[in-house]
Image: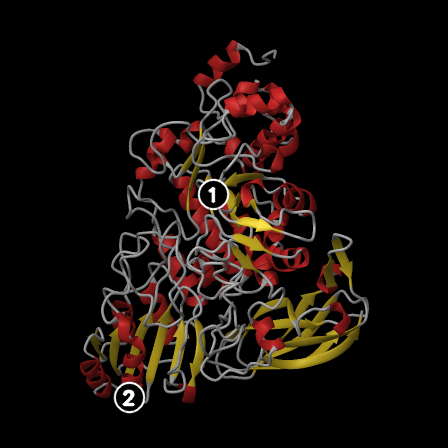
Amino acid sequence: MKMKVSTAAVLVLSQTSSALVEGPWSNVNDTPDARAKALVDEMSLDEKLAMLHGPPTGPCCQCKTNASCAYVGNIAANTRLQIPPVNMNDGPQGFRDNNHPDTSTAWPSGLTMAASWDRDALGEWGTGMGKEFYAKGANVQLGPGLCLARVPRNGRNFEYLSGEDPFLGATLVQPVIKGIQSQKVVANAKHYVLNNQETHRNAVIADIDERTRFEMYYPVFKGASDAGVGSVMCSYNKIADHGSGGSSEGQWSCENPITLAHDLKVKTGFKGYVMSDWGATHSTSLMAGLDVEMPSAKYMNPDAINAGLADGSITKPAVDDSVFRILRAMFDVGVMDEPLEAWDWKKQEKNVTTAASVAAVRRLSAASTVLLKNDQQTLPLPQGAKIAVLGFGDVGTITHGGGSGAVTSSYIATPLSGITAAAGAHAKVTFNDGTDIAAAAAAAAAADYAVVFVGTLSHEGGDRASLSLDDGCDPSGGNIGKQCQGNHANQNALVEAVAKANKKTVVVASVPGAVLMPWSGDAAAILTNFLPGQQAGNAIADVLFGAVNPSAKLPLTFPNAENETALTPAQWPGLPDPKSPVYANYTEGLLVGYRYYDAHNISFSTGFPFGHGLSYTSFAYSNLAVAADGKSVTADIKNTGAVAGAEVAQMYLKYPHSAGEPPKVLRGFEKVALAAGETKTATFPLDAQSTSIWDASAHDWAQVHGDFTVLVGSSSRDIRLTKAWTA
């Protein structure tokens, strides 16, 4: 084709720091669509095909030798047009740098942040991570993770923002995307779709009906799309759908024309580009909706695509669309308008942790710490007391999970150091790692308060062996370093012994998801900070001593017993062989998490329900009302205690029975900050989507009309107000 860029323009570029050769795409006042189209029109076919894959040869995924492998993934720069390289890097909890492991910040995990139920906090988290990616020369952050916690033992639940509810995830993902992309870094929503287990993740077929897909597993990706996310990562698994034309034998997620090309790009309206998970490409599947193969070029290489163009199985408009989507994302967030030096791979050597990022981690971790129990106002702790810190309170401090979600920071603030600093000048703080349970109990008996740090780990590539604290703290798995070392096989016995020795025992659980707490009736106070990042100790001390009043809520259910939702082997990990399953059957449909608990009337004895979380103050609810136009629900929230605090008020809907929905579904939440004695009105917007279900026969959303019940309260099981409403 005719080239429209002059040699003079190239010479001008070489003397400046502009990222792009001047052309019709250079006007920053034009839309990203117009600019991307103009640039695509300028490119030769060879230049276009070079953008659809990673490096075809050479080393992969964080090397120290050259630009093409410096990051986890790379699309080569276009030297003629000076299109910058696409530098992709893990991950969802911060910049994972295996070559310089102490040069970026270990932020709280996605699930941890979901516990905040705080839109502003999620925006700060995204902005903080994006800033570090930019500083290290990466313009794509491989995160956030979004999948639903269908399986409580899924090894990657800690990465995911949704917890067990699609509305929660769809709401919280939006400020994260906007925060990351405000730093001129393209966010990557993953893993699309139905990557809900790690057992046999590279081959298992998720067998699911259409309604369940659209109501449970797509909404968070729709939320990301609505926020303008630039890229999506398709997952390793296969997907089968017997009800809407899909193969009953399953098609790979990265070449599935129904879930990818149609559902994501057409029904969801996603404008960005789709990249494969690393090694998840199995064919030249551009026509099925895949735009970029990562990390190499086995299937989406120029030879394969040219062959498809020649035989008609691939069209030129489809090639143009894939390239357009990549360039549009880069224009949209500002990658194209930065100087080329911004994307220099040698910037990866920089230490990008700052005092501001460390302070943000501390603040966000404290905001995401859930107070599960606080009998007789055991917390906050007084200064000057004798405190025994036990368990994983020092060298075994748990901060992050393993795999692409791991970040090794330059230092970790341990609970022992944080508590010692916060306890006051006259306090006496002792430590015992709990290896000798009798000695730990004796230390607890000699103290005014005992604070026991327990936990477990998980990682990419495998599901947890159980939900017990005693079964999942092997520090050898999944790049998780020296975390969780010591008496990890007897944590439940440790808590029981310490609680018996000291009636003011506080338990802090640092965990990657749901865990069992058979001793919850014995401990005076219980908190979970999930995977809190590198400021774990200072953040938990802020909560323990009352510098921060806890306001977080559980984003998933903490069960009373193993497999309380009665997943059969056919459902998880799948059959015919659970160790190497072919099919994972999603026959539970919409009954995931609290929806199952409500449908089966399961009460809580040692566990805690979805949405639960206490405060050092108390709140009263009143004046529930539905607007006359049906577009909002309001309720008054009053702080009836003596200290300032924040309450996450939650609004659920009970649908008419004929709709076939679970007993209640989350449709709104609002975090309300209140001074002591103050009252504010919480407003929960309602729209057509709030009262709709997916109609699989029409392949579209259908609004439900009839008699609803509006329920507002402090958790899924602490409903304070109800009101009948006809929609």
Depth check: give the residue in front, 496 or 433.
496
Visible in this render: residue 679?
no
Depth check: give the residue in front, 346 or 43.
43
Callout 2, which amino acid?
Asn
Q: Is residue 154 left or right of residue 393?
A: right
- Pointer 1 residue: 277
**Are discs 2 and 1 less than 8 Å apart at CB?**
no
**Which type of secondary structure does the marked residue at label 1 adopt?**
loop
Classify residue 428 by image quadrant.
bottom left
Q: Residues within 10 Å of mark 1 (few under 14, many from 20)?
A: many
Please determine whether, in this image, residue 564 is positioned above or below residue 143: below
**Which type of secondary structure does the marked residue at label 2 adopt?**
loop
- Pointer 2 residue: 502
- What percent of the width, then of the height, locates residue 640? 55, 84
Q: Which mark is residue 327?
A: none
Depth check: give the residue in front, 241 or 492.
241
Q: Quadrant of the C terminus?
A: bottom right
Visible in this render: residue 53?
yes
- What percent of the width, then of the height, locates residue 194? 55, 54
Q: Is residue 49 left or right of residue 410?
A: right
- Marked residue nearer the N-terminal end (2 or 1): 1
Judged by depth in the image, the label closer to the viewer, 2 or 1, is 1
Callout 1, which amino acid?
Asp
Please determine whether, in this image, residue 412 is positioned above or below residue 619: above
Q: Quadrant of the N terminus?
A: top right
- What percent of the width, then of the height, locates residue 596? 59, 72
- What percent of the width, then of the height, locates residue 33? 65, 32
Q: Is residue 281 left or right of residue 491?
A: right
Per the model, the C-alpha gap separating discs 2 and 1 is 49 Å
